[in-house]
C-alpha cells in the first residue's frame, strides 16, 4: 500500500518550476549564481552595444566613404569576451563584498564603493579591448593603418561606454534588488504576469516567532532589541538557500518561511530547516552573549496545503498568499507557549511527510484552534537523542 506521502505527491503532480530551480541553484552554488547573473546580463549588454556601434558605422558609411569598415562578427565576438570578463569580475566582487563587507553598510556607501570598483574594472577592460582584443580580432580585418584615427576616436568611445555602462549598471542593480526583495527566480514570472490573477498552489508554511520577545525587549531597550532581531534574521537567512526555503514575510519579531510541497518534503527540508537555524544560533552563541547577553530562541508552527498567490498593491507591490493553510500554521505556532513546546506541526503534515522514522514525534491531540470549527491534529517534533 502506497504511503500518504507518495499518494499526495502523485495527486499533486507537482513539477519543478523556474523559481524552484533558481532557488535550488543559488543554494548549491551561491558564488556561481552571482557570477552567472552578471555574465548573462553583461554579455547581452555588450553584444547590444556592439550591434549598435556596428550599425552606426554602417549608417555613416552610407554617407561618408570609410576606408576600413569593421566586420560584424569580430565585433560581436569581442563584445562577448568583454561581457564574460566584466561579468565575472563584478560577480566575484559582489559575492565576497555582499557576504562579508556589506552586511551592515549603508546603501549609499555600498553604491559608491561598487561604482568605484566598476570604474576600475571598466578601465582594465578598455585596456584589454584597445590593446589586446582589437589588435587580435578587428585590426587584421582592416585594409589600412588607421592608428591616427583610432587614437582620436578611442577617447570618445570610452566616454560613450561610460554613459552606457552607467545606465546598464542601474538596470542590473534593479534586477538584483528585485531578487533581494522577492527571492531568486521571481523576476521573470512577475514580468510574464504569472501572479497578476490569483493562482492556486500547494505550499508548506512555517511561522517562526521569537520566544520571550517582550522580556528581551524590556531588558535590551528598543534600539538594541532591533539590532538583536536584525542579527537573528540575518543568521536565519544564512540557512535559507541550503534548505531551499523562501522568506514570505518579516512581521515584527516573526519570520514566515515557505516551500513548494515537493521541495519541502524532499529530504524533509522543511523540518531540517528549523533545527539548522538552532545550530546556526549555537555557532554564533559567543557573539550573542557578548553583545546581547542572550541567544535567540524561536518557536515555530508548520502546516501544508492549498493557497492562492496573487500580486497585490499599486504604490508598493508584493506577492501575497491567501488561504486557510496560512491561518492554520499561524494558529499552530500560537499554541507553542500553551504546551511549552518549540516546534509544532499539523497531523496532516506528519502523515504526509513520513517523518515518523526520522524524528521524535509526540502527539498533542486534536485541538480546536482559534477561529476554527473543526479540531486540528497537532504534534511536537524534536530530534532523536543519539
Image (cartoon, rainbow, N blue to C red):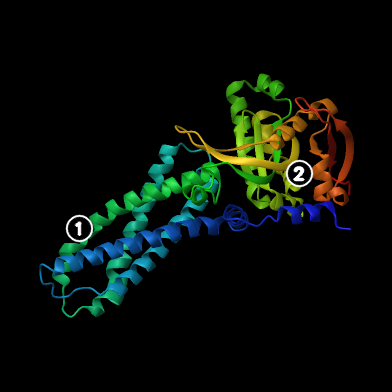
Residue 45 lies in quadrant: bottom left
Q: Sequence order check: which comes first, mark 2 or mark 1?
A: 1
Circles 2 and 1: CB atoms closer than 8 Å: no
Along the line of sight, the residue nearer the viewer: 322 or 344: 322
Q: Is residue 327 left or right of residue 6?
A: left
Q: Is residue 312 above or below residue 175?
A: above
Q: Residues within 10 Å of mark 2 (few under 14, many from 20)?
A: some
What percent of the width, then of the height, locates residue 206?
A: 71, 39
The label number, if any, that marks residue 88 in the structure image: none
What percent of the width, then of the height, locates residue 357?
A: 88, 51
What percent of the width, then of the height, locates residue 164?
A: 29, 53
Q: Is residue 299 visible?
A: no
Count the numbered circles shown: 2
- SS for callout 1: helix
Q: Is residue 341 above or below residue 279?
A: above
Q: Residues within 10 Å of mark 1 (few under 14, many from 20)?
A: few
Q: Is residue 156 left or right of residue 229?
A: left
Q: Is residue 317 visible?
A: yes
- SS for callout 2: helix
The label number, if any, that marks residue 156 in the structure image: 1
What percent of the width, then of the height, locates residue 143?
A: 18, 80
Q: Which residue, given by chain and number where applicable, does mark 2 sit on? A: 275
Along the line of sight, the residue nearer the viewer: 264 or 84: 264
Q: Quadrant of the N terminus?
A: bottom right
Can you name the residue that lies furthest to the top here?
Answer: 218
Q: Residue at x 17, y 72 (%)?
A: 147
CA gap between label 2 and label 1 equals: 58 Å
Q: Residue at x 17, y 66 (%)?
A: 59
Q: Residue at x 80, y 52 (%)?
A: 5
Amino acid at each position: 500500500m502506497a504511503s500518504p506521502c507518495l499518494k499526495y505527491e502523485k495527486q499533486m503532480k507537482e513539477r519543478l518550476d523556474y523559481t524552484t530551480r533558481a532557488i535550488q541553484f543559488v543554494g548549491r552554488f551561491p558564488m556561481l549564481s552571482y557570477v552567472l547573473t552578471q555574465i548573462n546580463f553583461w554579455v547581452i549588454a555588450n553584444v547590444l552595444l556592439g550591434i549598435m556601434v556596428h550599425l552606426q558605422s554602417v549608417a555613416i558609411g552610407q554617407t561618408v566613404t570609410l576606408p576600413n569598415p569593421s566586420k560584424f562578427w569580430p565585433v560581436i565576438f569581442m563584445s562577448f569576451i568583454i561581457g564574460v570578463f566584466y561579468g565575472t569580475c563584478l560577480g566575484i566582487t559582489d559575492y565576497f563584498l555582499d557576504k562579508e563587507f556589506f552586511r551592515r553598510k549603508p546603501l549609499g556607501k555600498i553604491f559608491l564603493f561598487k561604482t568605484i570598483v566598476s570604474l576600475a574594472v571598466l578601465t582594465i577592460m578598455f585596456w584589454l579591448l584597445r590593446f589586446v582584443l582589437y589588435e587580435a580580432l578587428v585590426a587584421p580585418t582592416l585594409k589600412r593603418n588607421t592608428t591616427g584615427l583610432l587614437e582620436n576616436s578611442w577617447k570618445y568611445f570610452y566616454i560613450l561606454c561610460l554613459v552606457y555602462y552607467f545606465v546598464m549598471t542601474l538596470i542590473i542593480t534593479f534586477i538584483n534588488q528585485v531578487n533581494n526583495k522577492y527571492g531568486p527566480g521571481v523576476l521573470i514570472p512577475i514580468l510574464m504576469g504569472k501572479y497578476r490573477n490569483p493562482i492556486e498552489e500547494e505550499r508548506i508554511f512555517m511561522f517562526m516567532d521569537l520566544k520571550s520577545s517582550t522580556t528581551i525587549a524590556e531588558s535590551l531597550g528598543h534600539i538594541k532589541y532591533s539590532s538583536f532581531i536584525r542579527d537573528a534574521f540575518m543568521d536565519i537567512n544564512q540557512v535559507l538557500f541550503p534548505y531551499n526555503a523562501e522568506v514570505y514575510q518579516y512581521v515584527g519579531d516573526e519570520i514566515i518561511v515557505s516551500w513548494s510541497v515537493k521541495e519541502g518534503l524532499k529530504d524533509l527540508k522543511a523540518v531540517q530547516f528549523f533545527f539548522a537555524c538552532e545550530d546556526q544560533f549555537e555557532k554564533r552563541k559567543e557573539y550573542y552573549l557578548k553583545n546581547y547577553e542572550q541567544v535567540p530562541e524561536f518557536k515555530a508552527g508548520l502546516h501544508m496545503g492549498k493557497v492562492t498567490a496573487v500580486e497585490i498593491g499599486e504604490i508598493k507591490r508584493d506577492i501575497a498568499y491567501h488561504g486557510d493553510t496560512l491561518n492554520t500554521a499561524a494558529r499552530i505556532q500560537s499554541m507553542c507557549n500553551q504546551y511549552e513546546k518549540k516546534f509544532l506541526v499539523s497531523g496532516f503534515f506528519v502523515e504526509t511527510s513520513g517523518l515518523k522514522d526520522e524524528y521524535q514525534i509526540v502527539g498533542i491531540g486534536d485541538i480546536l484552534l482559534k477561529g476554527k470549527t473543526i479540531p486540528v491534529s497537532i504534534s511536537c517534533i524534536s530530534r532523536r537523542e543519539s
